[in-house]
Image (tube, grey):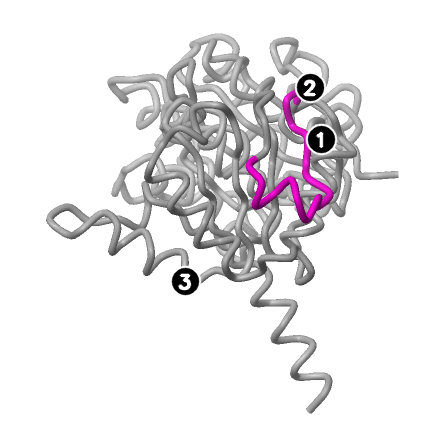
Amino acid sequence: MAGRSQAGAFMSAKRVFVSYCSKQGEWVWDRLVPCLKAGGAEVLIDRERFKAGKSVIGQMDATQDKANRHVLVLSPDYLKSPHCTHEMNRAIAFDPQFQKHIVLPTLRETCTLPPKIAKPNPLYVDLRDDKAAPQWTKLMDACSADLGTDTPAWLNARDEVRRLLRRKESVNLVVSRKVNWRGLVDNVHSEDDPKGAVGPLATVDMQAGACASRRGLVEQIIRVLGGTTPVPQEPEDLVTLNAFISGLPKKPCLALLHFDYVSHRADYDVNLWGALRDLVTEKKKLYLLIQSLASVQTLLPKDHPMSSGFTSLQTVELKGRS
């Protein structure tokens, strides 16, 4: 029974209510929320939970009551907002003396802490500089969220991948085993990107059984790009792939996850990679986001079309926490 109780407490600690003012909305949505979600927390927040036609205060309270971690993103504007202070007061009412570790004051801008926070004097999180890794660690640990790497490094890698994909450049995202890279890939094309969302990713997971053969991989690529074209046997499968992608009205981004499997798939021959390289480098009809544990250059032979001639592939590396 004790084991179950501890497990339940750990899981419930992942339900995180985020209280913030509109001025901090961009930071909350583009940086705080993605990190919490990628780290495994369930984020309870107005933008996702509230429905039109229902009382704002009622929905706010009902959402907040489901959480057992309350992140208060503090700033002068936050403390002037009736809605924000309402959320803050309700959160503090759950733990007035800050003894249960469920209310997490997070300083985003310099401000005078209200007496309800200042008097108990809890250890708050200082993210006025959100490149401060130790402060992020305090917050993530309190929310039972773990990215497998320092939060600023995770954000920097995501931003760099976004920057390159926005320019329609192909990217090799090289990650350590314990890094939560899936959350990063999912967030790359978020609509909350302040610089304009990267287009949708057509994602193929190369560890799936459907991708065990070359023809199977081709079928998956065509399917995720929206096609229903039947794929013939080799070698006509690559003719079909070339014709389908060449005929698309817009240049799509294809995400190939678990690319390390190329080292174990004899069926993925030189003709397949030559065809992909032609579509990406020569015809410029496609660009790639390749996720792998090792760089593409080390996964393929030196004389391989993709390793020796794929000069446009940019590498973004994300190492795990030491």
Amino acid found under the numbered disc labelled 3: Asp
Q: Is mark 2 on a helix, strand or loop?
A: strand
Q: Nearer the viewer, mark 1 or mark 3?
A: 3
Graded by Cα atoms within 10 Å as few (under 14), some (14 to 19) or many (20 or more), the crowding at tag 3 reads: some
Labels 1 & 2 near each other (Cβ < 8 A)? yes
Snapshot quadrant of residue 218:
top left
Amino acid found under the numbered disc labelled 2: Thr
Q: Where is residue 137 in the image (x, y as percent from the top left)?
A: 74, 40
Q: Where is mark 2, residue-wise?
A: 315
| Residue at the extreme left of the image, as rendered | 53
Q: Give whichever of discs 1 and 2 has the lower sequence position.
A: 1
Q: Where is mark 3, residue-wise?
A: 65
Q: Position of residue 3 (x, y in %)?
A: 72, 84
Q: What stretch is highlighted in magenta?
A: 114-129
Q: Where is mark 1, residue-wise?
A: 174
Q: Main secondary structure of the magenta part?
A: loop
Cα–Cα span, label 1 and label 2: 7 Å
